Image (tube, rainbow, N blue to C red):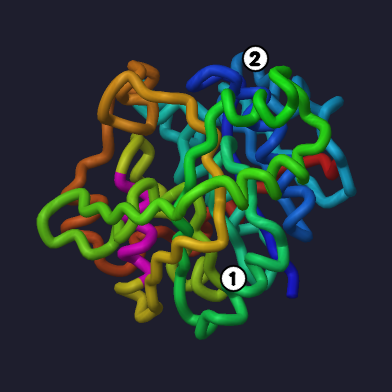
Amino acid sequence: MKLTAVIISRNDNYGGHLNERATYAINSAINTYDEVFYIDWNSTDGHSLLWDIQDNLQLRGNLKHFVIPPSAASQLTGYNPDAQKCCEVLARNIGIRRATGDYIVSTNIDIIHPKREDIEKVINESDGNTMVTLSRREVTWDIIKEFHGGEMKFEDWDALRDHIYINSEERIQSEATVKGDDYSIINCCGDFQLAPKHIWDSIRGFEEDLIYPLYADTNVQKKSVKHGFGLKAIYNPPMFHINHGSKGWGGGGIADGVNKVSNDINRAVTFQEQTQNLDNWGFSDIDIEFEVL
């Protein structure tokens, strides 16, 4: 069984300590999956976040690094000045469309990933026709520093994962974004969405007109149902989100003023049926260069 993870970000230090969070996220992904896509979207001067943390990565030749510089990001979003600075739907689709795994995870840059055997257990207990969203648990920098004797270190991260596996509790928190929403099913659903490749291909990834923040994760889960697949939330194995706080409700950088415009909830959730993406979703008609690390 081949597993792929798709992770996106940019070099804006969103939430603070982004390089540190990204180091834990990508190292744990490299350890867990056969193939890891990191898509760097719209970083300042095209300087990928990955280049800043590369010396702290435990590379195994399974990390595929795509850089979408500001000029290309602007073109791919139709030169829309209000498009999400790190346009999640487009960046994720670049990786999902090119992934070769039997199962594909769409996830974020500040996640400490579960162990491989734990993900395989989830897959083996699934029916092969269901999108699974995994609930996250919060871990703070205080907990990480305490484990490392009060310092910020990147070695022993695997032992850190074992430590917080044991010293954390399930986070069961359901969510609905709007009346009649049966598709979010779990708070912060977009941190970890796992599905067989044939589901991602059938729904054509994320809706590519949802170029603003919010609701795209609920949308992709609703699309799975509308295309005849199952949708399930699970609370174990643990998947950890390195907490970076928030200035208030909003997500997607809206609360922090990074982004100004959000997706229309009616378009994204209420009225979504099957996909409206074209056959070339994920810019499959464009040859995008990448490096393997």
Looking at this view, name the residue that lies furthest to the right. 60
Check disc 2 and report its element: helix, strand or loop.
helix
**Quarter of the rendering occupied by the C terminus:** top right
Task: Find residue 43 and report its image quarter.
Answer: top right
Residue bearing the label numbered 1: 197
Instruction: Identify the residue at image location x=27%, y=33%.
Output: 262
Q: Position of residue 111 (x, y in %)?
A: 58, 42
**Between tags 2 and 1, which lies in front?**
1
Task: Find residue 124 and report its image quarter.
Answer: bottom right
Instruction: Identify the residue at image location x=57%, y=46%.
Output: 167
170 or 88, which is in the foreground? Answer: 170
Seen in the picture, residue 14 relative to 183 is either above or below; the reply is above
Q: Is residue 214 left or right of residue 202?
A: left
Mark 1 residue type:
Lys
The mark total stands at: 2
Residue 45 circle label? 2
Question: Dot 2: few (<14), some (14–19), or many (≥20) neighbours within 10 Å?
Answer: few
As measured in the structure, the alpha-carbon distance from the residue carrying label 2 to the one carrying label 1 is 33 Å
Instruction: Identify the residue at image location x=66%, y=24%.
Output: 145
Q: Is residue 234 left or right of residue 175?
A: right
In the image, which residues are magenta?
Answer: 215-224
Q: Is residue 155 left or right of residue 122?
A: right
Residue 216 lies in the magenta stretch: yes
Q: Position of residue 178 (x, y in %)?
A: 15, 51
159 or 56, which is in the foreground? Answer: 159
193 or 168, which is in the foreground? Answer: 168
Q: Position of residue 72 (x, y in %)?
A: 58, 29
Of the numbered discs 2 and 1, the one sitting upstream in the chain is 2
Mark 2 residue type:
Asp
**Quarter of the rendering occupied by the N terminus:** bottom right
20 or 166, which is in the foreground? Answer: 166
